[in-house]
Amino acid sequence: DQQVKQNSPSLSVQEGRISILNCDYTNSMFDYFLWYKKYPAEGPTFLISISSIKDKNEDGRFTVFLNKSAKHLSLHIVPSQPGDSAVYFCAASVMYSGGGADGLTFGKGTHLIIQP
Amino acid sequence: DTAVSQTPKYLVTQMGNDKSIKCEQNLGHDTMYWYKQDSKKFLKIMFSYNNKELIINETVPNRFSPKSPDKAHLNLHINSLELGDSAVYFCASSRDLRRVQETQYFGPGTRLLVL
């Protein structure tokens, strides 16, 4: 049962352009969302997060947008740089479940390739 | 200085064997986790462990047992390995189990292949 879906396994974007990675979720209890970035042979590293009381969070070149009614979030990277080439995982959690014991629920990831 | 480290990085073993994966974090975090990334690339929580309290994901077979000698270590023991256990296992840690906003820091992963 896929509660977090990233329907694009890969995405190719030209350097300098905007990269938009999409994520959909089905569990309406989720109220905290994160993006992780993963290079080959390394563990995921935290990138940016957003709680459900917001619809946008920005950190430098990275912006996450949340559309609660559509159960959809997206990560915008602008401008895209070669070092952004990696797998991006969307993750979700329930903030007030009494703890993080349930861990994070991850999507399958989208492989972003930045073309020079 | 690696924040979350795992050993070994690669593990190839025969079906039926018992093996362990070690995890150490030097971040002073209270909470540690084990995740499994299967062949379909899903990263799924297996266990979380906080101040000697173990919280088990009930879908995990009891052949898997985490052991925490101290707050900085959470090892994963797997008995009677099966072919389906082949996956990448990630250890992670965070400051506080009760706050999901706390960033989880992941180790580099252990690639387990069961033959």
Image (cartoon, coloured by chain):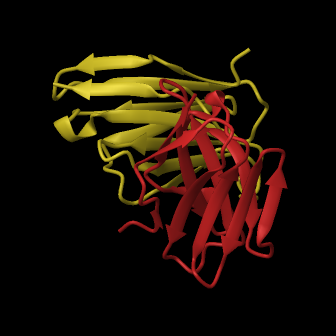
Chain colours: A red, B yellow
Please identify the quadrant where the N terminus of chain B is shown: top right
The x and y percentages for residue B37 are 40, 42
Vertical placement of residue B30 versus B17, above or below: below
Vertical placement of residue A4 versus B10, above or below: below
Q: Can the viewer see residue A116? A: yes
Vertical placement of residue A7 versus B80, above or below: below
**Which residue sits at x=77%, y=44%?**
B95
**Which residue sits at x=69%, y=38%?**
A16
Direction from residue A71 to residue B7 in the image, left or right: left
Vertical placement of residue A114 versus A99, above or below: above
Nearer to the camera, A19 or B63? A19
Nearer to the camera, B70 or B82? B82
Nearer to the camera, B64 or A3? A3
Q: Residue furthest bottom?
A: A69
Direction from residue B57 to residue A18 in the image, left or right: right
Nearer to the camera, B18 or A56? A56
Give the quarter of the image for residue B81: top left
**Which residue sits at x=22%, y=33%?**
B80
Give the quarter of the image for residue B86: top left
Give the quarter of the image for residue B92: top right
